Image (cartoon, rainbow, N blue to C red):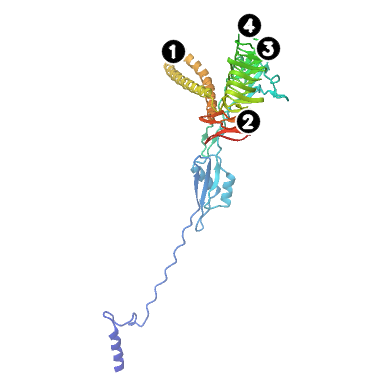
Amino acid sequence: MENEIKTTQDNAAVNTPGQTGVQPGAETGTQTPAPPPEPPPPPPPPVNAEGRVFISKDELEARIRITPPQNDGLDLSFAELKILLIKNGIMFGMDNEALAKLAAEPTYDTDIVIARGVNKRDGEAAELKYLVELERKLMPKETEDGKIDLRDIGAVQEVKKDDVLCEKIAATPGIPGTTVKGAQIVPTPGKDKAFPAGKNTAVSADGFKLLASIDGHVSFSGNKINILDVFLVAGDVSSQTGNINFSGNVIVRGNVLQGFTISSSGDVTVSGSVESAKITAGGNLVIRGGFRGGESGELDVSGNAACGFIEGGSIRVRGNLNSSYIINSTVKCGGSVILGGKGMIRGGAVTARESITANYIGAKISSVLTVVEVGNDPEILERFKKVAEDLSLHEKNMRDVELLITTLLKLKQVNRLTPEKAANLDKAVSYMSTAKQTQLEIREEHAMLSAQMADIGYGKVHVKNTAYHGTKIIMGTDVLNLHVDYSYVTFFRDGEGVNFAPFR
């Protein structure tokens, strides 16, 4: 008994307050069963594949990106893909083959092109096809003895009445495009181009041909084709003929004597020489014998000029100038000065817009001042200013007339247009029909002059043999005075001024 009691006491001694020292179930002699295990969580629900549509900024392309299904979810069917595109506004250019493949073999998390629009095609500008030579190449042949042969240069180009001078390929309106949303993309129509219709020319009834109105010769001047007849002088221009003022081409079989003048809107061809006379040519000028200008002789040429030689006088050529030599003359050329034969420039001043090519420039005697200038053309600057002013004034007049037309049309709509105002409306509409053509022509000349002005101040002087000391070379605002002789060089302008390199 003592032992049992002691054991009981010992057990009681280690119990904490509030505990009986009796294990659950001790009273009945049985154990409490463990709680049942928690049931497993239900499987996550299936998530079907989803698609997102992305449309390019220009709406010419649509892409789709598919997120993959999860937990045995379903892929998108062909019909669902198509409905998705339609819901996003895709109405044009669907790639059904790509849709079917995507439904059968899905590609996930990748942008797939699924529709393409058709871009517009802007119209093409009208084109002019010339059936005559616009610029007769007055290229004299150099003989073995160094002389210039001006006889065979193709100076005259004959045509008959109703010959086709130029054909027009009409501007196209362009082809519309369509976005993937089915919206139309409007093309920009091609611009029309005006015929270079000058004197004695006419546009055909269908509007696509420029025809000669008379028998004559072709002269291209001021960006227009002119058909001119010919005035022939069988001998000299002298007291027997008097001064010649003619709207067509002039051919002189003899010489032009001192003090006489020739004024022509076309080409002038002189078989002999010109002695201290004045010649104005609206086209090209050929003087086979040469020009002795003295102090009063003048040549003013709108096209190209070819002259056996030039001694004294002043020459203004808008195109190119070909000669054997130039001595003590003032020459201004809108193109290039090309010297063959002796190929010499000695004394005076020679200016060319593009280039000067010579064998010799200057003189061994430094007291003979020779000035050559390239790159500058004041006439282009003056003409550009005039054309810009004309264009501004013309477009202002067009705006004023358009405003008048709008006002008169409003009066017409409410039956308040008097007979006088109706006549004004007809005149205004007629004016606008011709004003638009004039505007097109002025803009074309303005663009051409702008392109030419971009190169102002730059050109080249080619010296095949020697440029002597004492010669002055001007390019733009830069000047180079030669203190020594230069041989076989090309002078040009760069960022450091007038420079030179071996002839090329």
The type of residue carrying mark 4 is Ser
Q: Earlier in the sequence, mark 3 or mark 4?
A: 4
Q: Nearer the viewer, residue 224 or 52?
A: 224
Callout 3: 10 Å neighbours few (<14), some, many (20+)? some
Residue 421 badge: 1
Q: Earlier in the sequence, mark 1 or mark 2?
A: 1
C-alpha distance separating marks 3 and 4: 13 Å
Q: Is residue 214 visible?
A: no
CB atoms at circles 3 and 2 under 8 Å apart?
no
Residue 239 badge: 4
Q: Nearer the viewer, residue 413 or 8?
A: 413
Q: Residue at x 59, y 21 (%)?
A: 328
Q: Which element is circle 2 on?
A: strand
The type of residue carrying mark 2 is Thr
Q: Nearer the viewer, residue 266 or 439?
A: 266
Q: Is residue 74 left or right of residue 287?
A: left
C-alpha distance separating marks 1 and 4: 59 Å
